[in-house]
Image (spheres, helix red, strand yellow):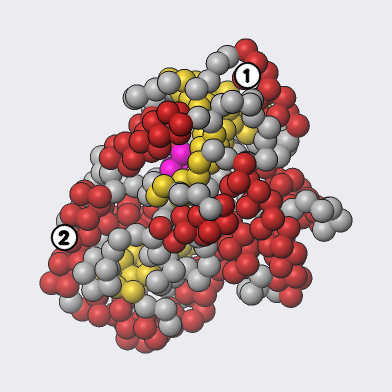
Amino acid sequence: MRILFLTPYLPDPPDFGGAARMFHLIQEVATRHEVVVLSLAGSGETPTGTGSLPARIVPVPVPLTARQPPGGRKRLGQIRSLLSRRSFQHALYHHPAMQRALDRLTREERFDLIQIEFSQMGGYRVPPGVPVVLDIHNVEYDVLRQAATQGSLPRRIFNQIEYRKFRREEVAAWRRATACIATSAADAAVVRDATGREVAVVPNGVDLDRFPRFPLDQADPAALVFVGAMRYRPNADAARWFVEHVFPRVRTALPTATFTIVGADPPPDVLALGSVPGVCVTGTVPDVRPWVERAGTVVVPLRAGGGTRLKILEAFAMGRPVVSTRLGAAGIDAADGEHLLLADTPDGIAAAITRLAADAPLRQALTDRAYALVRERYQWRAIAAELDAVYTRITLTS
């Protein structure tokens, strides 16, 4: 088949969750089908040209994409959205230039199927008769609902308004698609309830070649790391909350503990956390793997967000113990005390971290079972085969 992917930003480099999922699915799909990627590309963004993605990438230049950090232009767009019936998500993801490029490309070339990445991209007009798969990544309106309970009063008000607008738009996008896929059973159930249609679960995965396992004796048991793009509000919130409420408790029990926040585009309040004793904020790094390799524990203190966390699967692959909130580990078939440790309160998370630091056999047992889990169930090749089954089903019935 000839398959056209619509993406909200360039999937290469796969340097954070959304880009990594798109990159690896496209990489695997392209071994079975001919793939063209039509992608929004913000100012200064160009395909890396590494040759590792066996697909033709057609960038569509626009002023701003979701890959880029928050700034004056993005904040101005948020203010303008308050005066519109449309959400800020719509303004960020929908561009006339993209619609023109899509119209031109589908007029000049024939495609058997179109895959749209993220619900926010679901409003583009596609040719009649071509089946559409919408990869929702997460239930974005629920992320906005969670954000409306956190942060400053102006931010909470904005997110509440944004949640109400985008919920309507997101459900409409699900209903327009021929089929939707989700990363977790919980998200699939939300879409199924809204549309009345079955939703396939195509989970996130991990590249075991890119994230090889390292011996535990190479890690410092007192070194903690949190990895994630800090432009994503739930990651920034998690970093702040951990430093303010959890890390002091850890340092009381484990005075040598350090906490490293690794991720691109940290906002000023996250950068300021670097002044706290024992805390390091790296900002953008060329490769997160050395930071994870040195860590004794990977922490995932998320209090908001959706989908599933690739950072946990990558830690499992690299043989590093994980302490996470239950929301942080949602959608991954991992059990508390068997593959990782789960806790939701500052005292509970701190206790789990100090317990791991003092118990080498527990660290080894958790990482052995977690590595076996990702090897057996979360490799991209097997996951892409599940996606291919969705393609077969909808093309036979369309």
Residue stretch in magenta: 17-22
Q: Is residue 357 magenta?
A: no
Q: Is residue 326 above or below residue 27?
A: below
Check whether the beta carbons of the residues at disc 2 and disc 1 lie within 8 A of each other: no
Residue drawn at (21%, 78%), measured in percent from left and top?
A: 358
Front position in the image: 328 or 188? 188
**Residue with the most extreme top position:** 108
Near mark 1 (Cα within 10 A), the count class, few <14, some 14-19 or many ≥20, is some
Residue drawn at (69%, 51%), measured in percent from left and top?
A: 169
Residue 13 visible from this viewpoint: no
The location of residue 317, given as percent across then percent down, is 26, 52
Type of the residue with mark 1 = Leu
Query: Disc 1 designates what residue?
Result: 105
Helix, strand or loop at mark 1? helix
Query: Disc 2 designates what residue?
Result: 368
Mark before the other along the chain sequence, 2 or 1: 1
The location of residue 336, given as percent across then percent down, is 28, 72
What is the number of callouts on the image?
Answer: 2
Q: Is residue 343 left or right of residue 90?
A: left
